[in-house]
Image (cartoon, helix red, strand yellow):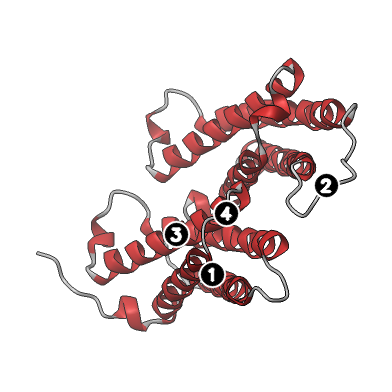
Amino acid sequence: MISVDLRALTQPVGAMRIMETILTCMSFSLVATVGYVSSPYWAWCMFTWCFCFFFTFLILILEFTAVSAKLPFAWDDFTTAFAMLASLMCLAASVIYPTFFTCTTCHRQIGASVVSWVCFGVYAGEVVLTCLRPSGQNSGFLSTLPGIMKMLETFLASLIFTSLEDWQYSGSPELQWCVAVYSLCFIFAIIIILLTLGQLTSYFPFSFDKLVIVYNILAAVMYLTAMVIWPLYSFRTNKRPSDCGHLCAWDKLVVVTFMTILNVIVYSLDTAYSIRLVFCVSNQ
C-alpha cells in the first residue's frame, strides 16, 4: 500500500524542488512558443529544461508517495547527484541560450534566460542544503569528490557531443580518433556511475577501485592526445571565416577544444585523487 508523506513537499528541499519544476517548465514553455531553431545548442537547452523538469517532478512524486524508500539504491545519493547534474546543465543552458538566441527585442527569449538563471540558483541551493544536511549514514559515491568528478566528466563530454558535426572529422583519421576518445570515455564513465549507484561493485572478483584507477589513467592519457590532436588538425588549414556570424559552425571547433582541455584537467585530478584515496588513505 502506498502511503503519503507531506513532508516531501513542505520541507525546504521539497519546496525548492517544486520551484525547480515550475521554473524549468516556464523555461522550455517560453522557448517553445518562440519556435524551433535548427541548432544543436537550441536542442541542448530544450533537452536540459525538459530533462530537469521530468526528473525533478518524478523525484517529488516518489518522495510524496514514499516509494523512494523502497528503491534498491541509495536514494539520497541519487537525489544529491541529480541536483548537482541539474545545476551544471542549467548553468550551461543559461550561458548558451542567451549567447546564441537572444536579442534586445527578443522578450520571450530574454525571459527564458532569466528564468533559467533563477532555476540554476535554486538547484545550486538544493545542492548546498543536501550536502550540509546532517546524516548518520556515509555519503554515497555520487556525493563524494570522485563521484562528482565522474559526473563532471560525462557532462563535459555531453557538451562536446553537442558541438560535434560530421564535417568536422569525416575524412580525418586523427580527428576520428578524438571522437572515439570522447565516446569511449563517456561510455565507461557512465558504466562506472551506474555500477556504483546500483551497488554492484562488490560482485567483482577484484578491486573495483583499482580498476577505476587504471581506467582514469587511460582516460587521462587518451584525452591528453585528443587535446593535442583536435586543435592541431582542426585549425591547421581552417582559419575562421570572415563572414562567420552569430551561430558560426567554426566556433564549435573552439568549443570542442576548450571542453577537451577542461576534461583533461578533470580526469587528471580524478586520477590523482583516486590514487591517493586507494593507496595512501586506505593504508593508514
What residue sits right under mark 1 in the picture?
Answer: 123
* Secondary structure of the residue carrying numbered label 3: helix
Q: Nearer the viewer, mark 1 or mark 3?
A: 3
* Secondary structure of the residue carrying numbered label 1: helix
Residue 230 picture location, percent across and down: 79, 30
The residue lying toward the viewer, choosing from 38 and 10, is 38
Question: In the figure, is residue 116 to the left or right of 254?
Answer: left
What residue sits right under mark 2 in the picture?
Answer: 244
Task: Give the residue displayed 57% in from the left and 54% down from the top.
Answer: 37
- Quadrant location of the N terminus? bottom left
Q: Amino acid at mark 4?
A: Val
Could you tell me if the residues under marks 1 and 4 are in contact, i.e. CB atoms within 8 Å? no
Q: Residues within 10 Å of mark 1 (few under 14, many from 20)?
A: many
Distance from Cα at disc 1 to Cα at disc 4: 27 Å
The residue lying toward the viewer, choosing from 102 and 191, is 102
- Quadrant location of the C terminus? top right
Say whether disc 2 or disc 4 marks the residue closer to the N-terminus. 4
